Every structure is written in structure tokens, then in C-alpha cells.
Amino acid sequence: MSLEQSNKVSIRIRRLPKARDIPLPSRASDGASGVDLIACVQEDVTILPGDWKLIPTGIALEIPAGCEAQVRPRSGLALRYGVTTLNSPGTIDSDYRGEVGVILINHGRKPFVVKRGDRIAQLVFARVMEVEFEEVDRLDDSARGDGGFGHTGL
């Protein structure tokens, strides 16, 4: 089963002057949910085990109202090096117009080096619901009730 192509949204992107040689975000395959974000570092950045760094991408986005962009880890970096994104998924709000940055953390055992042009994270776009809160004295019952963390067992 396939969905219609009406899911496409146009996202305006600005490449910063320091990123003229950096490719714009793109999908690695036709079925990819996200686009790859590329490191726009001026020189190699070493992230020591247990440390984290903000890595610039050299791009700014104009995300439509009612949408967000989620910065997510790349599974290959996590599996091979123990490197992932901190604050994951990181949210880029529709009214933010600054440079997209990725906070990488090294959970691995060896220093990890980020080089200019490396694929460091992925960006997934999602719709956001605008909510209104209605304060009440009682919530409707559910089968789960107030069962929290670990309530379903191992």
C-alpha cells in the first residue's frame, strides 16, 4: 500500500556563506524518513568520550507554521562509535531562523573526530498540533489508569 505524494511540503533553506561547499540536506534513499545534516566545521572537531560539542551545519531553515524539524541521531554513528545526538530528538521550531546546530555526544570509548562534510545527524519534519488546555477536576477513566514507568512489567 502506498500514500499519495500530497505529503510534500516546500521548505525554504538558506546556505550560509561558510557552507558554500557543503551539500544541502538530502535523503540517502527513496524510503528514508529524514534528510542527512552535514557538518560545517572549519577544522576537525574532536569529541572525547563522555564529552559533547555543538556542531554547525551552515544552513538556516524557514519551517512552515504548524510544523517542526526534529534533529535525530544517525544509527551508524551510534552503532560504530557510540556517538549520538544530545537532547534527542532536538526540536527546531517554525519561527527559528538561525543556523541549525547539532549537539553530538560521544558515549564511546575512543575520541570521535568530526570532519567538514561528515553526515552527523538526520532531520525529520513533522506536523505539530496546537493545543488548548481545559482544566477539569476529574479525567475520564482508562484501562491503564495512572500506571506509570514499568507498570507493564519486563
Image (tube, helix red, strand yellow):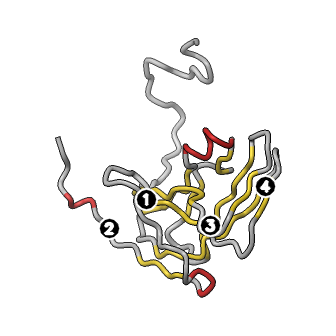
- Circles 4 and 1, Cβ within 8 Å, touching? The answer is no
Q: Residue furthest bottom?
A: 17
C-beta proximity under 8 Å, tags 1 and 2: yes
Q: What element carries label 3?
A: loop
Task: Look at mark 4 in the image and give the residue it sits on.
Answer: 47
Q: Which of marks 4 and 1 is in front?
A: 4
Q: How far apart are marks 1 and 2 (CA)?
A: 9 Å
For the residues labelled 4 and 3, say whether their Cβ atoms are less than 8 Å apart.
no
List x then y, in percent, for residue 125.
43, 59
Vertical position of residue 109 compared to residue 9: above or below = above
Q: Which residue is the site of mark 1?
A: 125
Q: Report, in whole angstroms, how far the alpha carbon at label 4 lies from the one at label 1.
A: 27 Å
- Mark 4 burial class by Cα count in 10 Å: few <14, some 14-19, many 20+: many
Residue identifier under label 2: 9
Q: What residue type is labelled 1?
A: Phe
Residue kind at label 3, given as amino acid type: Ala
Of helix, strand and loop, which one carries label 2? loop
